[in-house]
Image: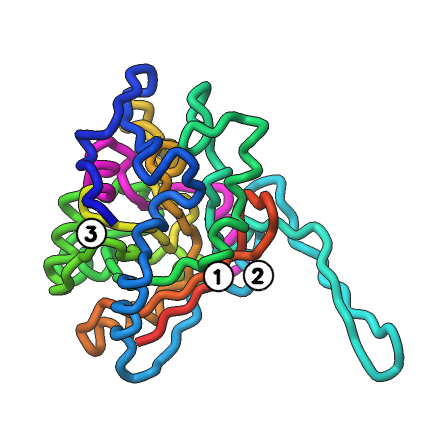
Amino acid sequence: MADLPKYDELGYIAELGARSASGVFGTDDLIGRLNLLTPERVLAAVTEVREGRTFNLSLPLNEPNPPWARGREQYRHTVFAPNRNSQDDYVDNFYLQGSSQWDSLRHIRAREFGFYNGIPAGDDHVLGIHQWAQRGIIGRGVVVDVEHFCRESGRDWDPRSGERITVELLQQTIAAQGVEVRTGDIMLLRTGFVGGFLAADEAGRLDYREHRDSNGLIATEDMARYLWDAGWAAVATDNPAVEAVPGSAEDGYLHRRLIPLLGFALGELFALDELARDCHADRRYSCLFVGVPLNLPGGVGSPANSIAVK
């Protein structure tokens, strides 16, 4: 793959105050930054497997409970016996973005400028999650444990404070971990949010739902520039929105900067605690990452279906 333009060389949309990668991977491209997961990079990622330890990165499908997004309810799982020697089952009321999940390129539109690669509303079904299911999201995962770095360095850190993680804090964390970021890497950003939610009692979980602030990436153009220029292919986090909640009009909307304008795969509510603990134990923060979204034609999102292997 030829060298990509730097962020500041991308086309500029004055009405949005943001840059767009439309056409960078080809005028007919439908997978965005996952183009960086070339066969060569996937093969190199396999060399991250040294002990064969595997780590599930997906919450149970019935977590978070209660559902994080207001208006959603828990799915209904029905098991039945079609005959005396077998069982079958089905699920009703199943929200594909209700648990650990991927946002497809169909998830967010950039106003009148359309979805990723300029695809207009009405044609956006072609950007469904099935495009990623054909190839998987497979590459070198890099754990970026901001929560651990802040606590180890004596900095106050509450995953529910709405703190905006800056480029500088990301880079400080990566430097402290001693890991090199390579083009095509998949960021696994840990804030401590999911672990805190799972440890809370019923009243605490309701408080999480009612007071929705969570730490996450700052939504500024500087963050979009860093993620593009550093070569990240995807960003998966353990918080509900990748970006900090609440955001601000001054910073902008990171989902719009990253999904329709730059073609990033974003993952939310990933379960990263066990993997992070293992990384701290052996001081190795890279792994083989394997994510296989549902092959749902036109899907806007999908359960994460992701594991890490070290």
Mark 2 / mark 1, whichever is N-terminal: 2
Mark 2 / mark 3, whichever is N-terminal: 2
254 in the magenta segment? no
Name the kind of residue labelled 1 in the image: Val
Q: Is residue 306 above or below residue 249?
A: below
Query: Residue 248 versus residue 139: which sits nearer the camera?
Result: 139
Please say if the residues under marks 2 and 1 sit with CB atoms less than 8 Å apart.
Answer: no
Q: Residue at image x 38%, y 62%?
A: 138
Q: CA distance from mark 2 to mark 3?
A: 32 Å
Give the number of the mark in front: 2 or 3: 2
Mark 3 / mark 1, whichever is N-terminal: 3
Location of residue 95 in the rendering, given as x and y in whole percent from the top left corner: 61, 49
In the picture provided, is 44 more to the left or to the right than 176?
A: right
Q: CA distance from mark 2 to mark 1?
A: 15 Å
Name the kind of residue labelled 2 in the image: Leu
Q: Quadrant of residue 294?
A: bottom right
Q: Residue at image x 28%, y 25%?
A: 18
Magenta region: which residues?
200-228
Q: CA distance from mark 3 to mark 1?
A: 36 Å
Disc 3, SS: loop
Q: Residue at image x 16%, y 53%?
A: 155
Question: Which quadrant holds the C terminus?
Answer: bottom left
